[in-house]
Image (cartoon, helix red, strand yellow):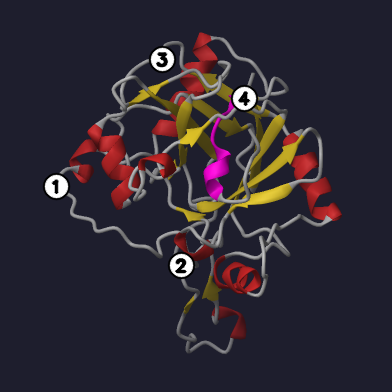
């Protein structure tokens, strides 16, 4: 099976062995640190939300009114990842960056069931991925095949108009269970085996030189065929460097549970998960709260 440039090509992952391993106690610490920023159940109940096709776009820059003071530095614009002036330092970017993933496979009844991301997949298997972050940021996914040149497979101009801004604990479902055709709701393994590696990159600020949103849509509109985005060598070197930064990982010990209605609603309606909802199967957390980027790799095991 080959990874496509469309985002549907993302989804069959096992955590790379280079990440740190932790015991049960450390697992609970990682899981607790990730889930503590989820909503309380009372905040989630009765929440009416309509699906917003633009919700993967960055919040607009908010210009603040100039102060009456002579100090010109008081005229500011609050941007993504920037600490607002009415908040004390550390309130916005002091938490460790976390990324959770859950892999679902289509069972014999056509339903989604949790599976171990490190399992081997065979021809005909169908899977879907659920990604969740603990902080607002920008999600990028790059793919390499058999160690070849990296190509960006998310964001995609055909999804959310090229947007990749993710709200904390509002999970992203890949591919979408709301797709018009059944075959588009799952990623299906074909007869072609291969070594696929996915790089999941979560950043507080957009990556420099990588088109997203309108820039990505415009770039691809001008192409007569596919429009693969290859990161510049210096950016890719920085991503590789960030990959070596220390992280902590917690992985579920049991699998097989069905996808819940709450999880399905959260992904399709943009609703944040609560502390009582199921935790991701695998959680990766940066070791330092000062880190602005989390990079983790996922290996595709396709026999």
Q: Circle 3 sits on which residue?
A: 255
Q: Is residue 164 left or right of residue 52?
A: right
Query: What residue is drawn where x is 33% and y is 47%?
Result: 178
Secondary structure at numbered mark 1:
loop
Relative to 164, residue 237 above or below: above
Secondary structure at numbered mark 3:
loop
Q: Circle 1 sits on which residue?
A: 46
Secondary structure at numbered mark 2:
loop
Q: State the CA–CA distance, disc 3 to disc 4.
A: 15 Å
Q: Circle 2 sits on which residue?
A: 59
Q: Residue 39, percent across and down?
A: 30, 41
Mark whose residue sits in front, 2 or 4? 4
Residue 272 visible to an observer of this rendering: no
- Depth check, front residue: 212 or 204: 212
Q: Are marks 3 and 4 in contact (CB under 8 Å)?
A: no
Q: Are marks 1 and 2 in contact (CB under 8 Å)?
A: no
- The image's mark for residue 15 is 4
Image quadrant in which the N terminus is located: top right
Q: Mark 3 vs mark 4: which is more N-terminal?
A: 4
């Amino acid at each position: 099976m080959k990874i496509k440039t469309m985002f549907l090509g993302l989804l069959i992952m096992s955590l790379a062995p280079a990440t740190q391993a932790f015991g049960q106690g450390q697992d609970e610490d990682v899981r607790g640190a990730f889930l503590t920023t989820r909503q309380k159940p009372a905040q989630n109940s009765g929440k009416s939300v309509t699906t917003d096709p633009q919700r993967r776009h960055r919040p607009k820059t908010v210009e603040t009114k100039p102060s009456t003071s002579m100090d010109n530095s008081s005229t500011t614009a609050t941007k993504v990842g920037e600490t607002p002036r009415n908040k004390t330092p550390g309130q916005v970017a002091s938490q460790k960056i976390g990324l959770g993933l859950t892999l679902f496979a289509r069972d014999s009844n056509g339903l989604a069931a949790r599976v171990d991301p490190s399992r081997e997949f065979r021809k005909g298997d169908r899977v879907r991925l659920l990604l969740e972050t603990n902080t607002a940021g920008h999600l990028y996914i790059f793919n390499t095949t058999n160690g070849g040149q990296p190509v960006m497979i998310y964001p995609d101009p055909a999804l959310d108009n090229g947007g990749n801004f993710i709200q904390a604990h509002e999970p992203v479902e890949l591919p979408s269970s709301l797709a018009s055709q059944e075959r588009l709701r799952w990623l299906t393994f074909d007869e072609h085996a291969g070594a696929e590696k996915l790089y999941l990159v979560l950043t507080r600020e957009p990556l420099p030189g990588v088109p997203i949103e309108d820039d990505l849509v415009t770039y691809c509109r001008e192409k007569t065929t596919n429009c693969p985005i290859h990161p510049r060598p210096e950016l890719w070197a920085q991503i590789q460097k960030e990959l070596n930064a220390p992280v902590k990982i917690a992985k579920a010990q049991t699998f097989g549970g069905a996808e819940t209605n709450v999880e399905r609603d959260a992904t399709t309606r943009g609703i944040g998960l609560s502390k009582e909802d199921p935790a991701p199967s695998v959680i990766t957390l940066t070791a330092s709260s000062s880190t602005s980027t989390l990079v983790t790799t996922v290996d595709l095991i396709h026999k």
